[in-house]
Amino acid sequence: NLGFIGLGIMGRPMAHNLLENGYGLTVHNRSQPAVDELVAAGAKAGDSPVAVAAKSDVVFTMLPDSPDVETVILGPQGVLEGAKAGTTIIDMSTIAPNVTRHIAKAASEKGIYMLDAPVSGSDKGAREMTLSIMVGGPREVFEACLPLLNLLGARIVYAGESGMGETVKLCNQVMGSLTLLAVCEGLMLGAKAGADLEAVLEATGGGAAKSWMLENLGPKITERDFNPGFMVKLMQK
């Protein structure tokens, strides 16, 4: 039995993928429409994090920032209040490594395991189960949870002890955000110089400038499709 807390741009499709692979799933979210969508697909609703934890052997969290994860796991009516010894928490949020270590320590004192498993690959990767997942925590817990993580991503990397998954994600964010900035600058240069941006994308996508950002977001930029796959304010955190 699995639990999933946080059904936003990333969490909702990830929860669907777990459900579609035959797992019992209890879900919770601050806004109700995403919960209703998952319930219609076969999940059960939990009215609080503690209710989700009470029904789950493994609880996934996918939340915006460090304070949200602390509240959901450590706060009143939080996961730790409902989880039994032996439960595993897999936090897939992007948060501060020191916060992860603090939460993991509090969980371990109650006999509860925790993995930090942030992801990269945007909402498209979440839908298509092609995410890159970087995982910190006890190796034996990682290996036990690997079959579940394989339902969410295509590249699962064990990064080390608690907090190292988040540390690797920080490295990813630096590389990804600066690459995206370069893609934007290059396309603006081409646009202002009168270049055919389709030609720019085709040519640069086959050379040294080739990147995930260019391949996946370059066409969205040239088409002026600014629907969010990830929010700037979350990158800034």
Image: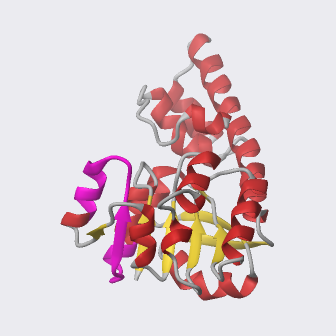
Q: Position of residue 51 (x, y in %)?
A: 39, 69
Residue drawn at 67 percent across, 51 percent down: 95
Find residue 42 and report its image quarter.
bottom left
**Quadrant of res 19:** bottom left
Residue name at image x 42 percent, y 77 percent: 54
Residue 149 or residue 193, whichever sits in front: 149
- The boundaries of the magenta stretch are 18-38
**Residue 181, x across and y down, in percent:** 68, 30
* The C terminus, quarter of image: top right
Q: Position of residue 232 (x, y in %)?
A: 58, 32
| Along the line of sight, the residue nearer the viewer: 183 or 123 | 123
Tell me if I can see residue 153 in this picture: no
Q: Nearer the viewer, residue 175 or 28?
A: 28
Q: Residue at x 35, y 75 (%)?
A: 25
Res 38 → quadrant: bottom left
> Relative to residue 178, is residue 92 drawn left or right?
left
Left or right of 36? Residue 10 is: right
Tell me if residue 65 comes above or below residue 142 in the rendering.
above
Let me know if residue 66 appears in the view: yes
The reply to whether the magenta stretch includes residue 26 is yes
How has the structure been colored for display?
secondary structure
Specify whether 101 is left or right of 40. Answer: right
Which residue is situated farthest in the front direction here? 76
Asked whether, in this view, residue 179 is left or right of residue 84, the answer is right
Please provide percent x and percent y for residue 40.
19, 64
Indicate yes or no whether the magenta region holds residue 35: yes
Please state, as top left, top right, bottom left or bottom right, where the N terminus lies in the image: bottom left
